[in-house]
């Protein structure tokens, strides 16, 4: 996303809220204005009503919890397997040689196309959703882990080796932290795909979950209800994504650092030729 | 002053201080070293018939254009790649891989962005599993020596290029190696910063009594810093001349405009013709 923070002024915030109001008004008025029947596009008010009803009677909470569990379980399973296999491929060339053809074959296949089979194999319960979510989360995690571990700077590797460091030390001190930006990006993709995989599998056949709820509302022509579930799904996706971004900013703290004020200490400062005693104050030129 | 004590440099005899050209040139012996590259494709001779002895606490600069094999020679000495022929001796031991008593400074600072300045300087201590507590005060003194004390807890991204390179240099010194290998360490810096860094490096070297092999393609930098300048020419990479630089220490930037300095520069430049073979 481009950096829009400079536009975030009080005036623009008010304008932004006004824009939202305008969109809602047009939406609310559109059945009348454009003669769109309510079963195609329900009015904003009807959607809000459906949302309120679903939230207060606990229906959305229950199905939302089921979906969230499936997403997180699939994400954890697929993500950790992707990480583990990615490490194995990056570390062992022989293993990589034998496993790569399968990876490339699976890579080019739309993974969600397996969802109908998983429903057939694992039934209408949570298992088929978790397996689909895990499968779609697995690949971006593995691919990103491999490229991350291979992204370590050559000079940095040479530095550790020149000091007599082992390959194990190169891995723990360098390759792993170098891979973290890739792994964090992989987690974000994996999370988004897990949610998609879960909902799609719920569409295909489920006894609970937001996808199943939406499907049954569609069959009953409760389009306002469908829209309200869509909003719940968007909020769930947003919360999951924002959580990961918060974690990423914590883990990759160094990516957000900028140059300190050069006035603090001039770059051209030349150190005193004699070393100060240990525990001594700074050289006079730097006080 | 603990900095002057060469703990691992058992042979650091004050008599061997780098004054004039009276070195005992037997600390490192590079004997008939050659290096070929290219497995399946055409073979490239990167180095041929390299003979060079380096004395303890001597400052030797290798100057030459790109492709003359100077970086290859440095990587061999660092133990990162093997020779194709010939041997390198450290004292009476053959060089057979990375040694624990060598510090390498690369063209880029090669800092780890997730480590603070202090933790970056301590990388050799961590890699060699030495006692962090024992080397902490030494690391701090070295950081102070290059004027970065108040940046100890900062991260590399918060530092300028010149500051980062200073961190890279004192890191190469923290485990008290007998020898520093420096591969065009100031090549990426602007001219002003570069001159300041040259002055600082000379001071560091005079205070630390390390043997330094310094690679550069700046002739004046080589003359300013070194006791001896080794001139290398490309295709195949070989030594064209070894020149003693008899300029008094401590050298100053003003000396770079004096006739003797200019004479050394001119003599070296002869090897590279006038067509600007140096880049």
Image: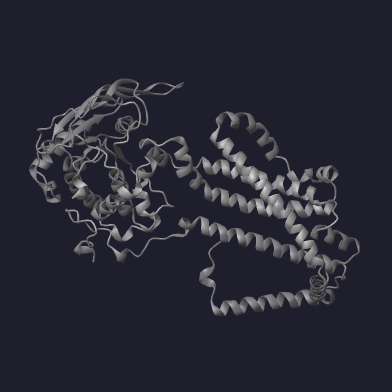
Quarter of the picture holding the C terminus of chain B? top left
In this rendering, the answer to whether A152 lies above or below A235 is above
Is residue B151 something one can see in this rendering? yes
Q: Could you say which quadrant of the image residue B23 lies in? A: top left
Q: Is residue A64 left or right of residue A274?
A: right
Image location (x, y in percent) of residue B15: 10, 36
Q: Is residue A267 left or right of residue A12?
A: left
Image location (x, y in percent) of residue B153: 36, 58
Q: Residue at x 35, y 57 (%)?
A: B159
Q: Is residue A227 left or right of residue B3?
A: right
In this rendering, the answer to whether A24 lies above or below B14 is below
Image location (x, y in percent) of residue B65: 28, 34
Q: Could you say which quadrant of the image residue B149 lies in? A: bottom left
Is residue B189 something one can see in this rendering? no
Which of B39/B210 is in front?
Answer: B210
Image location (x, y in percent) of residue A153: 44, 42
Which of A228/B95 is in front?
Answer: B95
Instruction: Indicate how the structure is coloured in the image.
Output: one colour
Q: What is the count of numbered marks? A: 0
Q: Residue at x 15, y 32 (%)?
A: B243
Q: Could you say which quadrant of the image residue A86 lies in? A: top right
Which of B152/A97 is in front?
Answer: B152
Which of A128/A110 is in front?
Answer: A128
In this rendering, the answer to whether B15 lies above or below B3 is above
Q: Is residue A149 left or right of residue B75?
A: right
Q: Residue at x 49, y 46 (%)?
A: A178
């Amino acid at each position: 996303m481009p950096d829009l923070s400079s536009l975030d002024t009080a005036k623009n915030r008010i304008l932004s809220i006004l824009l939202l109001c305008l969109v809602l008004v047009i939406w609310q008025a559109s059945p009348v204005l454009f003669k769109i029947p309510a079963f195609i596009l329900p009015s904003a008010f009807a959607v809000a009503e459906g949302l309120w009803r679903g939230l207060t009677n606990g229906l959305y909470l229950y199905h939302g919890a089921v979906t969230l569990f499936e997403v997180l379980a699939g994400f954890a399973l697929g993500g950790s397997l992707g990480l583990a296999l990615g490490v194995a491929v990056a570390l062992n060339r022989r293993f990589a040689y034998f496993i790569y053809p399968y990876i490339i074959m699976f890579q080019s296949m739309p993974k969600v196309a397996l969802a109908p089979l998983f429903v057939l194999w694992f039934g209408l319960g949570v298992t088929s959703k978790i397996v689909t979510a895990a499968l779609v989360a697995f690949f971006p995690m593995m691919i990103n882990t491999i490229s991350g571990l291979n992204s370590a700077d050559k000079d940095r590797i040479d530095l550790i080796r020149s000091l007599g460091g082992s390959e194990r030390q190169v891995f723990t001190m360098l390759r792993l932290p170098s891979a973290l930006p890739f792994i964090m990006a992989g987690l974000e993709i994996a999370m988004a795909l897990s949610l998609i995989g879960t909902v799609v599998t719920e569409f295909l056949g489920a006894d609970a979950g937001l996808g199943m709820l939406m499907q049954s509302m569609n069959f009953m022509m409760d389009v306002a209800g469908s829209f309200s579930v869509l909003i719940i799904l968007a909020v769930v996706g947003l919360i999951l994504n924002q959580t990961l971004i918060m974690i990423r900013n914590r883990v990759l703290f160094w990516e957000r650092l900028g140059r300190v004020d050069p006035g603090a200490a001039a770059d051209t400062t030349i150190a005193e030729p004699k070393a100060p005693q240990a525990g001594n104050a700074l050289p006079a030129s730097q006080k | 002053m603990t900095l002057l004590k060469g703990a691992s440099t058992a042979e650091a005899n004050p008599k061997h201080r780098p004054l004039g050209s009276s070195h005992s040139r037997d600390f490192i012996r590079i004997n008939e070293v050659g290096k070929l590259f290219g497995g399946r494709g055409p073979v490239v001779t990167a180095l041929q018939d390299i003979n060079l002895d380096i004395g303890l606490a001597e400052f030797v600069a290798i100057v030459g254009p790109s492709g003359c094999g100077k970086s290859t020679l440095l990587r061999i000495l660092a133990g990162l790649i093997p020779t194709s022929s010939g041997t390198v001796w450290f004292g009476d031991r053959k060089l057979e891989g990375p040694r624990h008593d060598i510090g390498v400074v690369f063209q880029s600072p090669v800092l780890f962005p997730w480590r603070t300045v202090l933790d970056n300087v301590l990388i050799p201590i961590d890699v060699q599993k030495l006692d962090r507590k024992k080397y902490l005060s030494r690391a701090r003194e070295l950081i102070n020596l290059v004027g970065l004390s108040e940046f100890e807890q900062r991260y590399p991204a918060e530092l300028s290029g010149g500051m980062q390179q200073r961190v890279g240099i004192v890191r190469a010194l923290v485990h008290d190696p007998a020898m520093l290998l420096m591969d065009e360490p100031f090549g990426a810096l602007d001219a002003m910063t570069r001159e300041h860094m040259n002055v600082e490096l000379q001071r560091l070297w005079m205070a630390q009594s390390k043997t330094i092999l310094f690679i550069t393609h700046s002739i004046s930098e080589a003359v300013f810093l070194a006791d001896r300048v080794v001139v290398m020419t490309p295709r195949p990479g070989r030594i064209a001349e070894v020149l003693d630089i008899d300029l008094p220490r401590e050298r100053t930037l003003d000396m770079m405009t004096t006739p003797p300095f200019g004479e050394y520069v001119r003599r070296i430049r002869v090897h590279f013709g006038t067509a600007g073979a140096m880049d």
